[in-house]
Amino acid sequence: MRETVYWLVGPGARVRHAVEFAPGTFPGGQLLPTVCNRWIKIPFAGGGHAESIIQRCPECTSAVRPHQPCEVTWNA
C-alpha cells in the first residue's frame, strides 16, 4: 500500500472509496481501481455532492487501517 490514500465519491455514489492514486491527476470520468477491488469513476469538477458524504466503504477501511497511510478526503 502507498503512503497516501485518497477517499473519493464517484458520480452518483453514497459512500467514499479509497484509491492509491491522486484523483486530480486523472480526467473526470476516468476509471480507477479502489482498495476494495472495485472500479470507481473520477468525478467531474463541480459535482458538488461529495462534501456531504462522510461514510466510507467498510472493505476499503479494513484494508487501509493496518497500514496507517496518510488519508486525504478528496472532493472534485
Image (cartoon, rainbow, N blue to C red):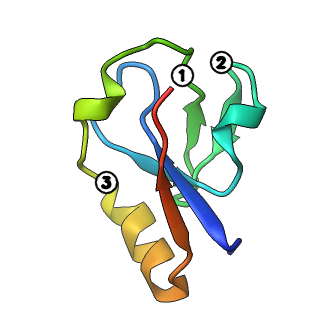
Q: Residues within 10 Å of mark 2 (few under 14, many from 20)?
A: some
Q: Earlier in the sequence, mark 3 or mark 1?
A: 1
Q: Which mark is residue 4?
A: none
> Does residue 67 sit above or below 10 in this rendering?
below
Residue 53: which quarter of the image? top left
Q: Amino acid at mark 3?
A: Arg
Residue at 58% x, 61% y is: 5
Quick one: SS at disc 1?
loop
Pinpoint residue 46: horizontal percent, then vertical percent.
47, 12
Q: Position of residue 28 (x, y in %)?
A: 65, 18
Residue bearing the label numbered 1: 43
> The residue tagged with tag 2: helix, strand or loop?
loop
Q: Is residue 27 above or below residue 40?
A: above
Residue 18 x, y percent position in the rendering: 51, 54
Q: Residue at x 43, y 80 (%)?
A: 65
The front one of 68 and 57 is 68
**Which residue is denoted by mark 2 in the rendering?**
28
Q: Estimate the spatial distance between the alpha carbons at disc 3 and disc 1, rounded to whole Å.
A: 16 Å
Gap between marks 2 and 1 measured at Cα: 5 Å
Disc 2 to disc 3: CB gap under 8 Å? no
Q: Nearer the viewer, residue 12 or 3?
A: 3
Q: Circle 3: is it few (<14), some (14-19), or many (20+) Cα within 10 Å?
A: some
Q: Which mark is residue 56?
A: 3
> Which residue sits at x=49%, y=64%?
71
The quarter in which the N terminus is drawn is: bottom right
Label 2 or label 3, whichever comes before in sequence order: 2
Secondary element under disc 3, as helix, strand or loop, is loop
The answer to whether marks 2 and 1 mark residues whose Cβ atoms lie closer than 8 Å is: yes
- Mark 2 / mark 1, whichever is N-terminal: 2
Asked if disc 3 and disc 1 are in contact, CB closer than 8 Å, the reply is no
Q: Looking at the picture, which amino acid does disc 2 mark?
A: Gly
